[in-house]
Amino acid sequence: MKHERRPTLREVARRAGVGVMTVSRVINNHASVQPSTRKKVEAAILHLGYQQNEAARLLKGQRAKIIGLIVPDLSDLFFASCAQTVQHIARSHGYMTLIASSDRDANLERAEAELMASRMISGLLIATSENGENEWLRKLQGPGLSIVGFDRPLLGTDASSVLAENRIGAEQAIQHLMDHGHKRIACVGYDEAVHPVSERIAGYTHHMYAAGLQPQVASGLADLDAIRHWLAGVLASANPPTAIFSLNNRTSTFLLQALAEQLVRVPEEIALVGFDDFDLASLMQPPLTTVAQSPVDLARQSINLLLELIRTQKNPDAGSSALKIFLPSRLIVRSSCGAHKTG
């Protein structure tokens, strides 16, 4: 059986009309290559079907053209969308993506990150489930491994991160409910120790106190049964909330289901605003008012930042420093937060 011969680096250089070193610089994403030259080389690579021999790269002590991605939960639509965006952009730059879910377990997350690092990956994107300092992660950063935190900062490290404006988004939601006349506004969800959720709770609490209102936070409600139990209790109380602020999209869907089961009309009897927009939010009954943050923008900014850090590590003269980038959130008003009838 005859095996088809793999094209060589020299053949790519010959077709592109450049030197072998220039082809190598393009493959390794070196900053010194002119855009026009890069296009010619990439066209030659595509035409010839050239593929790098990763085994040879590793034997030379070079890092594999692989990006590691660790998220808390791939069944969460937000993180699934992030993963798809990261994979698409990484592929367009010649990188493969290794994707793992930590199942919100900090110990499993650490094991996954250490395993990926042992495979000589070029960079790691991580939405950490660790609530404290990430000392172990700082040890993985060097030498040569670029790390970026997304959706959550990597405490205890000097790693860059891309975050959403969670606190401001929560304050916008609460102000919107107040503008509708609501004063008894409950805050419901889970994962309160995780950075994005803790920031949303902080925004809610601060805005309630600033308005002279009493916060009502119900955290640790991670499933439908817990939501049902909480809702039954508050509906039986003397002064039930007239509005609910949900801390994430999963809690929002549980709340709508539990409210429907209790025959509570939304928004006539209880208004609802949720953090995180999702595809079906506009199709739910009633259509759900949400604070939207874009998982696509978050993932795009994160992977582009990581690729830039990888490039600067290969070109020390370019320099680099830790960054903290905040992306805006916006309130999408639908029908679930209608005016409250006082009296």
Image (tube, grey):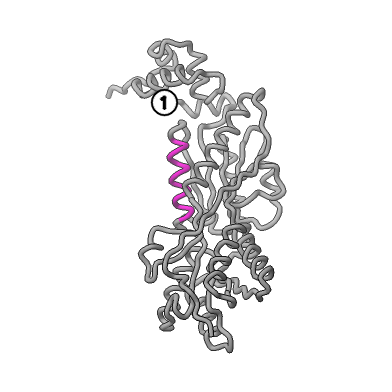
Q: Position of residue 83 (x, y in %)?
A: 47, 47
Q: Secondary structure at mark 1?
A: loop
Q: Please name the residue shown 55% across and 64% down the image.
A: 173
- Identify which residue, 17 or 145, lies in the foreground: 17
Crowdedness near tag 1: few (<14), some (14–19) or many (≥20) residues, C-alpha within 10 Å: some
Q: Please name the residue shown 66% across and 25% down the image.
A: 316
- Identify which residue, 40 or 113, lies in the foreground: 40
- Identify which residue, 211 or 129, lies in the foreground: 211
Q: Main secondary structure of the magenta part?
A: helix
Magenta region: 78-91
Q: Amino acid at mark 1?
A: Gln
Indicate whether 189 appears above or below 86: below
Q: Is residue 79 magenta?
A: yes
Q: Please name the residue shown 45% across and 38% down the image.
A: 89
Indicate whether 230 appears above or below 32: below
Residue beneath disc 1: 51
